[in-house]
Amino acid sequence: MENAQTWIDKGIDFVFEYGPKVIGAIIIYIIGSFIIKKLMGLLKKGMMKKDYDESLQKFLLSLASWALRIFLIVMVISKLGVETTSFAAILAAAGLAIGLALQGSLSNFAGGVLLIIFKPYKINDLIEAQGTLGVVKEIEIFTTKLITPDNKLAIVPNGAMANGNIVNYTAEGKIRVDTQVGIGYGEDMKKAKEVLLEVLTSNPKVLKDPAPSVNVANLGDSSVDLAVRPFCKPEDYWDVYFATVEGSKLALDKANIEIPYPHSVEIQKKG
């Protein structure tokens, strides 16, 4: 009976000593979970208002949720009387090790976040970056996927994209198509310019504003080189380019204006 009474006394002492701590820890966990839920709701609404990318929203919400829950667990453990200094040190060491192991990936992630926030380009934009020209197919957290003009998939790390030069051909809504046509020195230059300008203005995909232009670009060895420059929508670039090159040749032939071509001259020695 004495042993039983001893264990009962110890049990009562344990309850009185640790009971309030356990109850306090439970209350902290319940209230903390409620606050985290409300904070996550507010954060989600704020991101939706700012029109954050969906993939970035999910990642940042997940990251914030985990960070807040780890903080809550540390508070609960501390309320129970457990020393949290060593626990925090272990977390810090683990975070450092993971950061060093994933250094390249973290750089790409940071680049992806910057690209999604500042939006130097968006899906379906024609861009040139890191030596690659293509239409943006997908912007992911770690990489950007481009479709090149020859229909290849190029995957570029976001770290390099965020830290390098980006040329966005779509952003302004119009793009200039640069082509060059040579005519003989003996040809009527004014007439040639009129013929080429007619080729441009008759193409429905060539914009009227800014107006297309034909100007003398260079006086070559055997030709007067004319810069033929129409403007078009970015998605019509290649259609306008090919139509301009082909149309220029056909129109100049029809107007009997010579387009010089390279030829060799054979010199015979007397002897």
Image (cartoon, grey):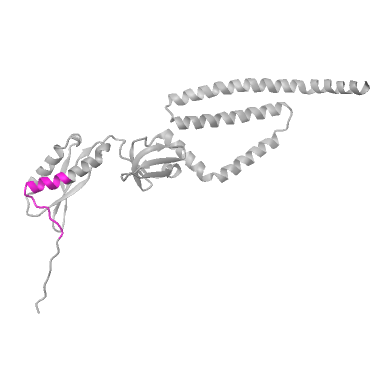
- Name the image quarter holding residue 212: top left
Q: Quadrant of the N terminus?
A: top right
Q: Is residue 248 left or right of residue 54?
A: left
- Name the image quarter holding residue 143: top left
Q: Is residue 202 left or right of residue 65?
A: left
Counting the numbered discs, the total is 0
The residue at the point 47 percent across, 24 percent down is: 46
Residue at far right of view: 2
Query: How far across and how far down the image is residue 256, in percent?
Result: 6, 49
Image height check: is 114 above or below 257?
A: above
Q: Is residue 257 magenta?
A: yes
Q: Is residue 233 left or right of residue 190?
A: right
Query: How far across and how far down the image is residue 205, in percent?
Result: 20, 36
Query: How far across and how far down the image is residue 262, in percent?
Result: 15, 59
For the magenta stretch, what is the residue range? 246-262
Q: Is residue 4 magenta?
A: no
Query: How far across and how far down the image is residue 29, in percent?
Result: 65, 23
The residue at the point 9 percent across, 55 percent down is: 185
Image height check: is 63 above or below 153?
A: above
Image height check: is 31 above or below 100?
A: above
- Name the image quarter holding residue 261: bottom left
The residue at the point 64 percent across, 41 percent down is: 93
The residue at the point 51 percent across, 43 percent down is: 105
Q: Quadrant of the C terminus?
A: bottom left
Residue at far bottom of view: 271
